[in-house]
Amino acid sequence: MNRSIFTILTAGALATIAFDMFGQALSPLFGFAKLAPVGLATSTLNTIFGSVPKGGGDMMHFITGLILYPLGYLLVARPLQKKIMPILPWPLTAVAYGIGLWVFALYFVAHLIAGNPPFLGWTGITYVAFWGHILYALVAAFVIERGPRALQ
């Protein structure tokens, strides 16, 4: 059990670092849009609760990245893939999961909950978020599938 928790937290931490580095540092460095996941989380919390204490958006971003999204891969995406297409390799499952995360974040959360245009109006941030969520899923899935020992 402790090993599973460690694996989930390691997967989430490394994937969140990759997502944030890609979306907030590398993408703008190369002239593309900059992701603002904390801004979206804060906006969502404000919509739901009316106001949010300082740091609430950061906490939501970290809880989602460290725990919830890796659990989604481990408990939903991978078991579904094993039942529907058992021969599909895990990297392709991870790509599909990343696209699912992107739809969840930019349509369900950003649009249906926070009230932004669907997929944030198909601006530059939409495409950076697309690749960022795929990168997140690939990193998280790698750690989950190969275990933390693969990083040594």
Image: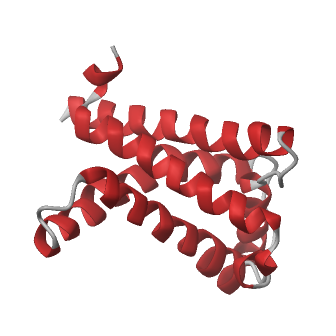
- Residue beneath the point at 34% across and 39% down: 142
Residue placed most toward the observer, 28 or 37:
28
- Residue beneath the point at 80% across and 58% down: 39
Colour treatment of the image: secondary structure
- Residue beneath the point at 31% across and 34% down: 7
- Residue beneath the point at 81% across and 65% down: 124
Residue placed most toward the observer, 15 or 38:
15
Residue placed most toward the observer, 45 or 87:
87
Task: Estimate the x, y position of residue 103 in percent, counting from the top left.
Answer: 56, 75
Q: Is residue 115 above or below residue 12?
A: below
Q: Is residue 58 above or below residue 44?
A: above
Q: Where's the N terminus, which quadrant?
A: top left
Q: Is residue 117 left or right of residue 95?
A: right
Task: Estimate the x, y position of residue 56 in percent, counting from the top left.
Answer: 72, 52
Q: Is residue 150 above or below residue 96?
A: above
Task: Estimate the x, y position of residue 107 in percent, counting from the top left.
Answer: 63, 80
> Residue 93 lies in what quarter of the image?
bottom left
The mark total stands at: 0
Q: Where's the C terminus, which quadrant?
A: top left
User: In the orientation shown, which residue stands out farthest toward the right?
Assistant: 31
Q: Is residue 14 left or right of residue 126?
A: left
> Residue 146 lies in what quarter of the image?
top left
Q: Is residue 52 left or right of residue 87?
A: right
Q: Is residue 54 left or right of residue 112?
A: right
